[in-house]
Amino acid sequence: MNNLSAQNLQNRGIARAYVLGYPVDIVSMVDALNLIGEFWQNHKPMHVVTLNAEMTMQSLSNNELGQIIEKADLVVPDGAGVILALRARGAEFEKVSRLPGIELAANTLETANRLGKKVALLGGKPEVMENLIKVVKEKYPGIKLTAAINGYFKEEEEAKVVEELAAESPDLLLVALGVPRQEYFIHKHRPKFPNTVMIGVGGSFDVWTGYVQRAPETYQKLHLEWLYRLIKEPWRFKRMAGTLPKFAVSSLLESLSGKMKATIARNPLQEAMEAEARK
């Protein structure tokens, strides 16, 4: 995280916690949008990561991805697993709530629409991008869509893709290439986007265009969006079965370890002696 973002978070009283060693910024939607607005005002690049349990577990075995997350300007708690891991630590985090990446991206688009910002889109299947262009132009008529490129390009075409995306210096770039590819892309090409807020949005384009249905609100409120996706897309079972239980166990052990350390640190006798000395 660069100095500007660190200062912004500190000035706003925004806490940064850690789950399995990776940062999570305790922000509301309003906080996140305000920070994005400040980066726009200061004409600075910004990388926003939407962290969930699967990405966290990938990072443990993928040092490159882990370092990218650590260097991101803002890391929002996207997944239910991350939230539950934080809440398990006690009262300090009991009111922490999810900030789904798909909702942050949609709200950022609404803000960009209101401010007349330039927006570029990258990712998704060709037919998804074709429909997304129509959806965005209809729903957000105030933005200037500078580029819209699907995610089916070859490695040797990447330089040309970056050149096209960066040509008009977009204020916002949404990248839907999946994890970790979208994080790699944003981090690698950040120097080409010196004034751009960049957000990895995963499968958001599929949802916005109706190719995939998002979990009903009931599932979302119960932190079971992952279960709905599993029901609709059973091919995910093997991947989820290999990561979610490991994340749950690892984060629980981390929470218990943290509580033990905190208990030792808050030795009642020592606190009483210090209180007496202050009188």
Image: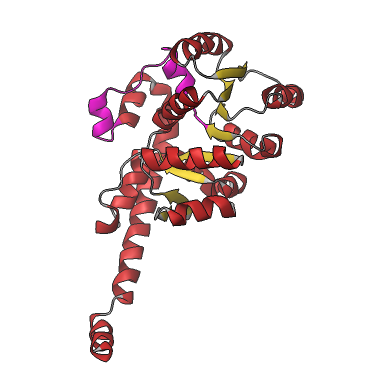
Between 236 and 84, the one lying in front of the other is 84
Q: Give left or right: position of 147 versus 217.
A: right
The residue shown at (58%, 11%) is 126
Q: For residue 83, which quarter of the picture?
A: top left
Return the x and y of residue 229 as percentages of the image width and height.
Answer: 36, 25
Q: Position of residue 185 (x, y in %)?
A: 64, 33
Residue 195 screen position, x and y as percent: 63, 36
Residue 90 seen: no
User: Magenta residues?
Assistant: 200-224
Quadrant housing residue 51: top left
Q: Could one spot residue 145 in this view of the protein?
A: yes
> x%, y% of residue 73?
54, 46
Up the image or down, 32 lies above or below 135; here it is below
Q: Nearer the viewer, residue 108 or 214?
A: 108
Q: Residue at x 59, y 30 (%)?
A: 171
Check the image and report above or below for 169 versus 96.
Answer: above
Q: Nearer the viewer, residue 207 or 279?
A: 279
Judge whether 128 appears above or below 184 on screen.
Answer: above
